[in-house]
């Protein structure tokens, strides 16, 4: 009986999505189809120091001594070196080493990814009802696809045609100003230096745009969205500028990574904006890429509606044969 229980646990994976303030985890296994089944575990606060104790506690709570695989996604840059793979969380005092995952769970297969890469791993598994088209709906495609997350920062990851994952620091790229109006914006927002994409395309960036127009500082994303939908002129202008620049950034990343088969957007900023995102301005900024405007026009863009696609992607990786 003990041998049977141990064998069963080896077909289970522990997956965890580590954010700046909380850690969401689940047990995952294949349950009769290609899409992993996820059993959510209790949400915990993101620990300081190391991750082993939290992972071990999850296993104890589930009545397990070990699992066959463990995959963790973290909101930070994963450093991959010959002797060590690790990530230091920028928003908490936590460092995660790949070796920690094996030590805490006894897993023979361990993975450590950036959180956007984990979401990219889930793209082949997402159903139509877990996606919402931005602009004219276009058919889902396989091939090179791009995930962009917009929260306190902007992140991006790529799923290649062969299923490989590419982690990026695309949010640190320079923000491009094309029109005279946009050049004036840059001069007002960053008169003494460069402006990165995520400095503007983020929660704080949206608030900065609104402050420049209205003179009111520190307004929350949801409040700007409400004001825009109510017809306030400053909020509407803010949303047009934000949406256009988001489109420009997305179009640039499509060109850079050859992501002709789809862009998938996710993040708290988009959730709070809801219908206030100006979709025509977004597509116009995205498609302003002559002589490749027609090619960019054909690229589908979706919002991801799955409650935690990072866990789904981690499970997909951990349980792959």
Image: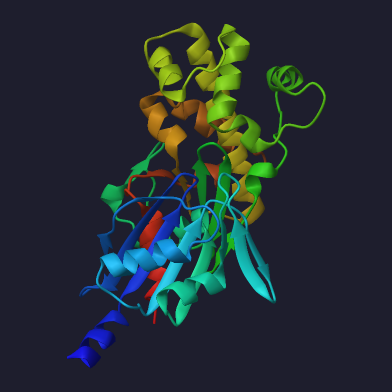
Q: Tell me where residue 107 sits by quadrant.
A: bottom left
Seen from the viewer's position, the closer of residues 203 and 295 is 203
Q: Residue furthest right?
A: 192
**Residue name at image x 61 percent, y 47 percent:** 90
Can residue 37 be seen here?
no
Q: Tell me where residue 9 sits by quadrant.
A: bottom left
**Residue name at image x 60 percent, y 20 percent:** 208
- Specify the quadrant that holds the C terminus: bottom left
**Residue name at image x 41 percent, y 44 percent:** 302
Residue 275 lies, in percent from the top left, at 37, 26
Residue 81 lies, in percent from the top left, at 69, 71
Seen from the viewer's position, the closer of residues 125 and 109 is 109
Seen from the viewer's position, the closer of residues 282 and 295 is 282
**Residue name at image x 53 percent, y 61 percent:** 50
Can residue 251 be seen here?
yes
Q: Is residue 181 left or right of residue 259?
A: right
Q: Tell me where residue 127 sits by quadrant.
A: bottom left
């Amino acid at each position: 009986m003990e041998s049977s229980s141990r064998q069963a646990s080896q077909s289970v994976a522990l997956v965890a999505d580590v954010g700046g303030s909380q850690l969401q985890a689940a047990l995952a296994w294949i349950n009769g189809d290609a899409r992993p089944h996820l059993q959510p575990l209790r949400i915990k606060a993101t620990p300081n120091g190391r991750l082993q104790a939290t992972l071990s506690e999850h296993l104890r709570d589930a009545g397990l001594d070990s699992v066959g695989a463990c995959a963790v996604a973290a909101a930070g840059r994963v450093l991959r070196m010959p002797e060590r793979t690790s990530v230091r969380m920028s928003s908490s005092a936590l460092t995660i080493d790949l070796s920690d995952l094996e030590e805490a769970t006894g897993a023979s297969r361990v993975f450590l990814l950036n959180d956007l890469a984990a979401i990219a791993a889930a793209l082949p598994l997402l159903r139509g009802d877990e996606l919402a088209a931005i602009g004219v709906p276009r058919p889902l495609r396989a091939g090179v696809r791009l995930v962009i997350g917009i929260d306190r920062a902007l992140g991006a990851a790529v799923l290649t045609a062969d299923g490989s994952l590419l982690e990026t620091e695309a949010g640190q790229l320079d923000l491009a100003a094309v029109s005279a109006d946009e050049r004036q914006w840059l001069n007002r927002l960053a008169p003494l230096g460069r402006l990165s994409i995520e400095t503007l395309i983020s929660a704080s960036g949206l608030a900065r745009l609104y402050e420049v127009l209205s003179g009111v500082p520190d307004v929350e994303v949801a409040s700007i969205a409400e004001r825009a939908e109510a017809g306030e002129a400053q909020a509407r202008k803010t949303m047009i500028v934000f949406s256009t620049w988001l489109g420009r950034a997305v179009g640039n990343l499509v060109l850079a990574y050859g992501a002709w088969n789809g862009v998938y957007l996710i993040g708290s900023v988009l959730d709070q904006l809801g219908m206030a995102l100006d979709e025509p301005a977004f597509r116009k900024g995205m498609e302003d890429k002559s002589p490749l405007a027609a090619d960019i026009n054909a690229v589908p863009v979706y919002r991801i509606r799955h409650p935690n696609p990072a866990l789904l992607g981690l499970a997909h990786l951990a349980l792959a044969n």
